[in-house]
Amino acid sequence: MKHVLIGSFDLGCEEVGLIVREGVGGEFVTNPRPAISIGIETHDFGLVMEALLHEAFEFVAFRLQVRYSPDGSYSSDHGFYLFSFPHSTFSDIVAKVARFSVPAMPALKASWEAYHNPRKKR
């Protein structure tokens, strides 16, 4: 399996592609088109959803300019990112992620199931 675009879904004020790939975890890109890539190799769909929610939340925080790198470099260790925002911004991020996740989750689950059960017909 390579990177497979399974759909595009509204994440705030823009459509964001949802890509599945081998491996685990996730990441997002903003160029050339906004997309979130999620690894589906794990047998625990909860971990797949965890990666999706994490990346969607971070994507919105990035777009709202509330994610910061303490050393000014976004190419260094992502574990050092800082987030700073008021509760109203937190609510806005959660709302955007929820509205993205509702249509994205069935597409992601179908891809995950097809990957783990390639012979099972749907």
Image (cartoon, helix red, strand yellow):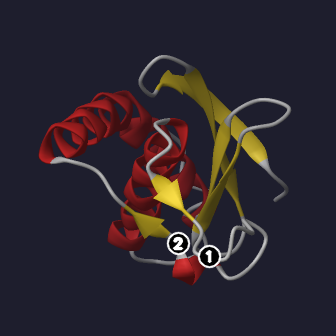
Q: Residues within 10 Å of mark 2 (few under 14, many from 20)?
A: some
Residue 5 position by quadrant: top right
Q: Residue at x 41, y 23 (%)?
A: 12
Q: Nearer the viewer, residue 100 or 82?
A: 82
Name the residue carrying label 1: 78
Q: Nearer the viewer, residue 36 or 20?
A: 36
Tell whether label 2 touches label 1 (CB within 8 Å): yes
Image position of 17 (left or right of 56): right
Q: Is residue 82 above or below residue 20?
A: below
Image position of 39 (left or right of 104): right
Name the residue carrying label 2: 81
**Amino acid at the residue labelled 2:** Tyr
Residue 58: image x %, image y %? 47, 54
Q: Is residue 44 above or below residue 55?
A: below
Residue 48 position by quadrant: bottom left
| Secondary structure beneath label 1 | helix
In which quadrant of the rendered image does the N terminus lie? bottom right
Q: Nearer the viewer, residue 102 or 83?
A: 83
